[in-house]
Image (cartoon, rainbow, N blue to C red):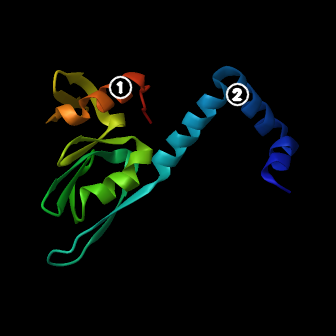
Amino acid sequence: MNWLEKISANDQLYNNLASFLDQYEESGLEKALQLYRTTHQAYICKTKQGKQSITKLNIYDIIYLEIQKHDISVHTVHGTYHKYGSLANELKFLSPYGFLKCTKNCIVSLNHIQSIHGDDINLIDGTQIHMSRKYASTIIIAFSQSKPFKV
């Protein structure tokens, strides 16, 4: 039995899905699925310095990342974690989850931006990050088109 047959066979699920689609249409379903993926997607912080450690984080908890040389600081709602790598690789992995580059050395989660004033991004944790002109228009457009993303 494929998934369409399973949905059709379950009256409550079918009615819930039909009601959801009537109210929010297909774009709402896509956003709901993205929210589910984001809130359930793991992000791995693996250190190479001293004793090796591995920390598994929820992507939704990540506020921003910044890099100096190859040392990446991952700022989350629970604290700061460190890993070794490149910002390009991190952005490649995180961009489907609403992460954007705001400076040469920083990636920010669109979901954790509270406001933008001039060239400064104000994050939900009170952090203020400068936004370079090169990335400003992309961030401003994405932020203005985004809806609040609360769990």
Q: Name the residue under label 2.
A: 21
Q: Eyeballing the image, is 63 above or below 15?
A: below
Residue 96, x across and y down, in percent: 44, 46
**The C terminus: image quadrant:** top left
The CA span between labels 1 and 2 is 27 Å
Residue 46, x across and y down, in percent: 28, 69
**The N terminus: image quadrant:** bottom right
The mark found on residue 28 in the picture is none
- Foreground residue among 60 and 104: 104
On the rendered structure, is 55 left or right of 97? left
Say which of marks 1 and 2 sits in front. Answer: 1
Q: Which residue is drawn at 63% across and 24% down?
A: 24
Q: Residue at x 46, y 54 (%)?
A: 41
Q: Eyeballing the image, is 28 above or below 48?
A: above
Tell me if residue 126 can be seen.
no
Q: Is mark 2 on a helix, strand or loop?
A: helix
Q: CB under 8 Å between callouts 1 and 2?
A: no
The amino acid type, in three-letter code, at marker 2 is Leu
Tell me if residue 18 can be seen.
yes
**Which numbered disc, 1 or 2, marks the residue that appears first in the sequence?**
2
Q: Residue furthest front?
A: 134
- Foreground residue among 104 and 81: 104
Residue 111, x across and y down, in percent: 36, 35
Q: Pointer 1: residues within 10 angstroms few (<14), some, or many (20+)?
A: few
Which image quarter: residue 108?
Answer: top left
The mark found on residue 141 in the picture is 1
On the rendered structure, is 110 left or right of 82? right
Q: Residue at x 43, y 32 (%)?
A: 149
